[in-house]
Amino acid sequence: MKRYWIYIIIGIVVIFGVWQTVAIVSQDANKQNQNTTVEIVALQDIGTVPSLTILPLYELKVSSPQYQTGAGVSYMITAGDKTILMDTGDNLTEADPSELEQNMKVAGVTADQFDAIVISHMHPDHIGGKDNWFNKSFSIGKNTSIPNSLPIYLPESINLEGDRGKVVSNPTILAPGIVSLGAINFNNPFPISFMRPTSGEQSLAIKVDGVGVVLITGSYISISGGKLSTGSSTIL
């Protein structure tokens, strides 16, 4: 008898997941049919940076077995004289030190090298694991404290101690040549959508001398017909 109840519960979960997916697709289709547009004011004189390097600190594919790996990302972005930590990866094994902390140690990277932290979006594999997602926060790991003076740029409000973190709702110049495109809302996939139907995501656009604009995203960004979008919100 217990087995039948298990089958019933699994069936309900599957039906709910399909219903959520259909609802999201229908919602997106309706928005597209309505030709909904988002008015964006172009930024002027964003400046440039002389150079750009991106060091993956957490990623699915790695160059050495010394590094911990998994879905999600964490990038150390050095743009001119500014160094940004973008996202903090995952910590599936709930390791201590965290998987990101282990990778930072292997790469010889310390938190005091960062001039700012940018969180692209609040999914577990971009904020340091599921515990941070449930707490609506993020972390590098239990052994790494984030200085109070370090700027933190967020796509939405989260739980941080004190008056910390700035939500970037619109395109914003973070430093000369470094721009956040601002948070764009998107529908979360199931089962995340069960608790949080929507989230926001921001990307970075960095204008490099002699190269042009380099777009750095966490995920979920698509380019179609020369336009950058998440869901139905066109921003570029």
Image (cartoon, helix red, strand yellow):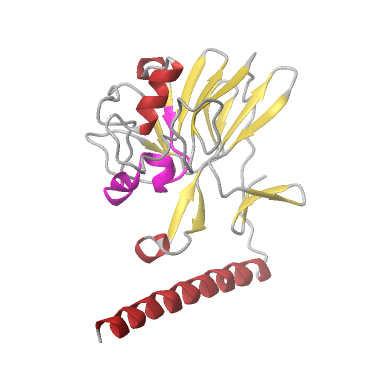
Question: Which residue appears at 44% of the width and 59% of the height?
Answer: 198
Q: If the image is split into quadrants, where does the C terminus sit?
A: top right
Point out residue 62 in the picture as x, y percentages from the top left corner: 54, 31
Question: Which residue appears at 54% of the width and 74% of the height?
Answer: 22
Above or below, comparing residue 192 to residue 46 in the picture: below
Name the foreground residue: 107 vs 26: 107
Above or below, comparing residue 192 to residue 11 in the picture: above
Point out residue 135 in the picture as x, y percentages from the top left corner: 26, 48
Relative to 223, is 85 on the left or the right?
A: left
Above or below, comparing residue 16 to residue 114 in the picture: below
Residue 114 in view (yes/no): no
Residue ranking furthest to the left? 162
Residue 61 in view (yes/no): yes
Name the foreground residue: 133 vs 107: 107
Question: Which residue appears at 43% of the width and 41% of the height?
Answer: 126
Q: Is residue 131 magenta?
A: yes
Point out residue 91 in the picture as x, y percentages from the top left corner: 36, 40
Question: How many numbered marks are there?
Answer: 0
Residue ranking furthest to the right? 225
Q: If the image is split into quadrants, where does the N terminus sit?
A: bottom left
Above or below, comparing residue 4 to residue 87 in the picture: below
Range shown magenta? 117-136
Residue 103 in which image quadrant: top left
Point out residue 174 in the picture as x, y percentages from the top left corner: 50, 27
Question: Which residue appears at 45% of the width and 25% of the height?
Answer: 66
Q: Is residue 25 magenta?
A: no
